[in-house]
Image: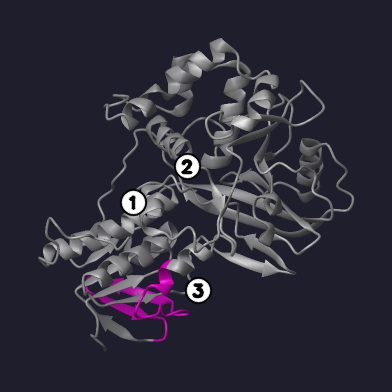
Amino acid sequence: MSRDTSVVIVGAGLTGLTCALALQHHGVPARVLEAGDAVGGRIRTDVVDGYQLDRGFHVLDPGYPMVRNHVDLKALDVRKFTAGLAIRSARTDTLQIVADPRREPQLIPQTLMSGKLHPASLASLARWTSPTVDAMLGGEGEEEDVTRRESMDAAGLLGPLRRIVDTVLAGVLLEDEGSTSSAYTRLVVKSFVSGTPKLPAGGMQALPEQLAARLERPVELNTPVAEVAPRSVRTADGEHIEADLVVVATDPQTAERLTGRPAPEGKGQTTHWYAVPDAPTDFRSIVVDVRETRGPVVSTVVMSNVQPTYAPEGMHLVSASSLLRPGQDPVGDDEVLRHVGEMYGVSTRAWELIRRDDIPYAVPAQPAPFVERRRMEVADGLIVAGDHMDTASVQGAMVSGRRAAEGYLQRRGLLDDDSELLPG
């Protein structure tokens, strides 16, 4: 039995790492135990034949306050997406650009030519997003939370623009039936309005690796935990660790197994990764298909257009993401390849499938009514943290880690009103 720490953190994803950094900043020793061979949790990057493959499609949104305030984006050498979309529609034979005129003024002519910005549609979009704008300006926003489908219907958001919004959100929320909370959906919209998504030079895993590098005590990798209890942890190799607090910062299903706290419903994703000799487009944007009859791909990106380090010199990397619904088989490789070729309008004969990622639990569902902060305590001395306890996002994962540390520091009288919880 060992007791050389105040807090034991199970899991070295963004939540566990943020919690450990906050505790370290206030002089509290913590051990971080990670079952895997690297930090990151669900955010991992593998190098395969010179290609950087994230495990599922991820982007880094600098609009998130936790990212803006506590991540060194310059050190990550991030490159940004175009602040807009490339759209495959039945109207033309080419991809059409719809971009944010504030951030991409050079694309205003192409955006206007897309024919997607009818005044009536823009007015309905403004009605739907008005609670988001009100919240950003300090107002209260929407009073009653409903599903995003109901909120869009109520705002009169219909027709081609509705199809675009639905298609984009399907790739973000990993559902296409409109079941997500409208309040949560508007938080997502707010983050995209606040910042343009980016990709780090070292892949998305560079984000948790940067956080882990700041820890004075290294994460203990390849250390699975067999059992947790209030103020104690038993590892798979038999070590018994006592501490003032145990923070279970694993994925929701592992947290359920260890603590009995039920995991929320999850949303799944399948991502195909292709090695491509010639980029099918030079756009640095997400490509979506808004035709009435279309295939399974909800979004595709030429990743190497955004961040060249994702592919070897002279080659390109294309991702294609589809929904993986509970209880259903993943979509077939041939069907995805056919659809992604249609979306770009190119032959895919020379494309090579490097890997497919089937992730049944990619993000926790966020149904209405939205609960932004869930109770973390399982018992005195044992809590559960993670994006499933806050919001299903990088922001939510990091906030949950901060909350876990903040509660402990306040109970121990180590945090006063003037203290900075996390270093900038």
User: Any mark on residue 195, and which?
Assistant: 2
Q: Is residue 25 left or right of residue 249?
A: left
Q: Which residue is mark 1?
A: 389
**Mark 3 packing: few (<14 Cα in 10 Å), some, or many (20+)?**
some
Is residue 262 at all visible to an observer of this figure? no
Q: CB under 8 Å between callouts 1 and 3? A: no
Which image quadrant is residue 231 in? bottom left
Q: Amino acid at mark 2?
A: Gly
Residue shown at the point (61%, 16%) measured from the top left: 159
View extreme (bottom): residue = 1
Q: CB under 8 Å between callouts 2 and 1? A: no
Q: Amino acid at mark 1?
A: Met
Residue shown at the point (29%, 24%) measured from the top left: 143
Q: Is residue 383 left or right of residue 321?
A: left
Of the pair 178 and 23, the residue shown nearer to us? 23
Name the element at disc 3: loop
Q: Amino acid at mark 3?
A: Gly
Q: Is residue 366 above or below residue 93?
A: below
Q: Is residue 310 left or right of residue 170?
A: right
Identify the mark nearer the N-term, 2 or 3.
Answer: 3
Identify the mark nearer the N-term, 2 or 1.
Answer: 2
Which image quadrant is residue 147 in? top left
User: Any mark on residue 291, and which?
Assistant: none
Identify the mark nearer the N-term, 1 or 3.
Answer: 3
Q: Is residue 98 above or below residue 31?
A: above
Is residue 49 at all visible to an observer of this figure? yes
Q: Which residue is mark 3?
A: 36
Name the element at disc 2: loop
- What stretch of residues is rendered in magenta? 211-237
Image quadrant occupied by the N terminus: bottom left
Q: Position of residue 216 (x, y in %)?
A: 34, 79
